[in-house]
Image: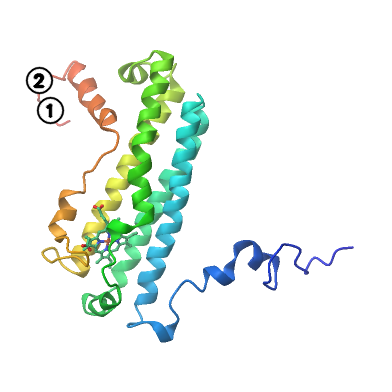
């Protein structure tokens, strides 16, 4: 009988847990205590590295969802998009760990960053690269089914899979906007709102970029639905 404590997976680590998860490599990707310019670099690096991992997963799911939409499997795509959306929400939660950084301490951490800046985040680059394709796939799917976006919303019960897909894509936009908003507040809290970033970008520019949206038609259809509604044209009331 097999000794269940003996590793059977390929690799050199002592256990299959470490071999499968490649914990040796993973845990050597952070600076050691003797290498940091300030203790808080550990927190800073952990938040960024874990954010990149979750964004990598979110983007894998988004790309897979896009392929599923293109082969007429919107319900399966919705399941992956829900997961992707929750992953982006986690990245926003991670940001709040940086509330523990003081401006004075971060001023020291910053000296270790060179010209590094979030614009070069592979995760966020992928978000920008992949999102438009998901929207385009949804347009193609509706064309194949000969249904307009308005009809998807008007007949949400019959077109439930398309309705759910539209809503998950809208949530993706919303989650990325939420991340940008919280990122700006973290930045203002730690380095201030009127200074220049490590790659030369004024923090004010981040404020102007909060509202970047990938799926404009999904937002615009709300206007159309409200305008067409009985109270749509009168502009009275609270909402
Ligand atoms: C101490 C915390 C942080 C500070 C002070 C900070 C500061 C900044 C600044 C100043 C910029 C403008 C670019 C420049 O530096 O010139 C920027 C951009 C950016 N940062 Fe951060 N950041 C922080 C944490 C994070 C984290 C945890 C992430 C997650 C990966 C992140 C991702 C980004 C991204 C994606 C951009 C580009 C934003 C856009 O496209 O509008 N940042 N950050």
Residue 63 is situated, as x and y percent measured from the top left of the image, at 45, 40
In this picture, residue 221 sits left or right of residue 27: left
Taking 21 as reference, is 211 above or below it?
Answer: above
Residue at 47 percent across and 50 percent down: it is: 57
Query: Which secondary structure lies at badge 2?
Result: loop
Return the residue found at the far top: 146
Residue at 29 percent across and 66 percent down: it is: 116
Return the residue found at the far bottom: 34
Taking 128 as reference, is 122 above or below it?
Answer: below
Which mark, residue 27? none
Residue 33 is situated, as x and y percent measured from the top left of the image, at 43, 84
What is the quadrant of residue 50 in the picture?
bottom left
What is the quadrant of residue 139 in the picture?
top left
Residue 103 is situated, as x and y percent measured from the top left of the image, at 21, 75
Taking 89 as reference, is 231 above or below it?
Answer: above
Q: Which residue is mark 2?
A: 234
Residue at 53 percent across and 68 percent down: it is: 26
Q: Residues within 10 Å of mark 2 (few under 14, many from 20)?
A: few
Q: Which residue is mark 1?
A: 237
Q: Find out whether the residues at labels 2 and 1 contact each other: C-beta distance under 8 Å.
A: yes
What is the quadrant of residue 196 in the picture?
bottom left
Q: Residues within 10 Å of mark 1 (few under 14, many from 20)?
A: few
Tell me the quarter of the image containing the N terminus: bottom right
In what quadrant does ligand 1 lie? bottom left
Residue at 26 percent across and 78 percent down: it is: 111
């Amino acid at each position: 009988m097999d000794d269940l404590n003996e590793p059977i997976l390929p690799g050199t680590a002592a256990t299959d847990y470490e071999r499968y998860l490649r914990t040796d490599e993973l845990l050597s990707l952070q600076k050691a205590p003797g290498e940091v310019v300030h203790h808080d670099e550990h927190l800073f690096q952990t938040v960024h590295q874990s954010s990149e991992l979750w964004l990598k997963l979110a983007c894998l799911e988004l790309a897979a969802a896009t392929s599923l939409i293109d082969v007429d499997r919107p319900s399966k795509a919705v399941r992956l998009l829900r997961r992707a959306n929750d992953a982006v929400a986690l990245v926003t939660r991670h940001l709040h760990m940086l509330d523990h950084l003081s401006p004075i301490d971060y001023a020291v951490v910053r000296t270790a960053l060179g010209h590094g800046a979030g614009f070069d985040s592979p995760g966020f680059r992928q978000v920008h690269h992949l999102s438009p394709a998901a929207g385009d796939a949804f347009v193609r799917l509706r064309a194949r089914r000969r249904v307009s976006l308005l009809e998807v919303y008007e007949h949400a019960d019959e077109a439930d899979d398309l309705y759910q897909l539209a809503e998950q894509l809208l949530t993706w936009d919303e989650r990325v906007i939420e991340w940008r908003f919280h990122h700006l507040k973290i930045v203002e809290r730690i380095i201030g709102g009127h200074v220049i970033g490590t790659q030369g970008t004024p923090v004010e520019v981040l404020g102007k970029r909060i509202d970047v949206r990938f799926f404009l038609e999904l937002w615009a259809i709300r206007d159309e639905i409200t305008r067409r509604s009985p109270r749509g044209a009168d502009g009275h009331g609270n909402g």
